[in-house]
Image (cartoon, rainbow, N blue to C red):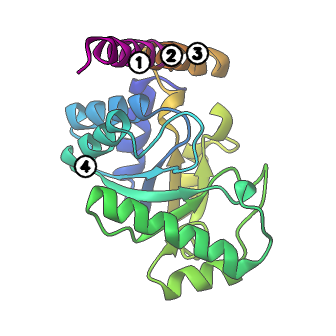
Amino acid sequence: MFTYKDYYDMVTTVGSSGKQVYFRHDVDISLDKALEMAEREQKMGLAPTIYFILPTSPYYNILSKRDSRKIIMLKELGHKIGLHYDLSVYQTDDIQEQANVILAQKQILEGVFNEEIIACSAHKPAMGKSPTRELGALLQIAGLHEVNLTMPGFKYISDSGMNWREDWREVVKANDKIQVNTHPEWYGEEEGTWQERIRDCNLDQQLFKLINDEIDSIGEYHEKVLRGN
């Protein structure tokens, strides 16, 4: 159920159903997997969609040269970017303060990637704090639509945790409006477990490379100091 072929079959089946469908990707863990998904979507002939970027992700840094380039490449493939925010990392329950932080992140994305951000989505609402309708209203006033709150009548289905809680085929049969949320890290050439998929993101190797690059950079700096440059 979580191979790239499965993904293609799902998208083409849902897309040709005649129903009103909103596809999106939440990029929780890996920009590399997001870019791989985007490239495969292009090769499959699928229409561009929207990738929701998580500025507070512990696994990538949207301001770094390496990772910002990957987001730019997503855009170059024709995709839009949205804001994925995590209320559980904010040290406040005040709705206005939450909105202020989310809007500040919106401005950062817009400034760095030169794209108007009009949509946002909450990260792991079932595991942390869920957005309230009051928060959604404040964001909408500022031109930012919370897709979990501002799409009334749309049946929401997601592969969160590499687990479709409902059979998407049955959902398509029973609903005229559907929001489909997928996460690029769960898909691969062959079937695998969610643990294997996370390991396949090679996060440890990326960190190891960053550490070695920093060691090399500091070593070069010391050599220049010793040479009096």
Q: Which residue is mark 1?
A: 218
Secondary structure mainly formed by the magenta segment: helix
Above or below, comparing residue 156 to residue 218 in the picture: below
Q: Position of residue 103 (x, y in %)?
A: 52, 72
Mark 3 residue type:
Arg
Residue 146 in view here: no
Rendered location of residue 184, percent (x, y): 47, 34
Mark-to-mark CA distance, 4 and 3:
26 Å
Amino acid type of the residue tagged 1 in the rendering:
Ile
Q: Earlier in the sequence, mark 4 or mark 3?
A: 4
Of marks 1 and 2, the one in the foreground: 1
Question: Which residue was labeled with disc 4?
Answer: 75
Disc 1 and disc 4: Cα gap in Å? 33 Å
**Disc 1 versus disc 4: nearer the observer:** 1
Q: Earlier in the sequence, mark 3 or mark 1?
A: 3
Residue found 48% across the figure and 84% down from its top: 142
Q: Provide residue 222's location: percent of width, then percent of height.
A: 38, 15
> Which image quadrant for residue 70?
top left
Q: Which range is magenta?
A: 211-229
Left or right: 94, with 209 as reference point: right
Residue at which label 2 appears: 202
The residue under label 2 is which amino acid type? Asn
Is residue 226 covered in magenta? yes
* 154 left or right, relative to 74: right
Residue topped by disc 3:
199
Q: Which circle's residue, 1 or 2, is located before the other in the chain? A: 2
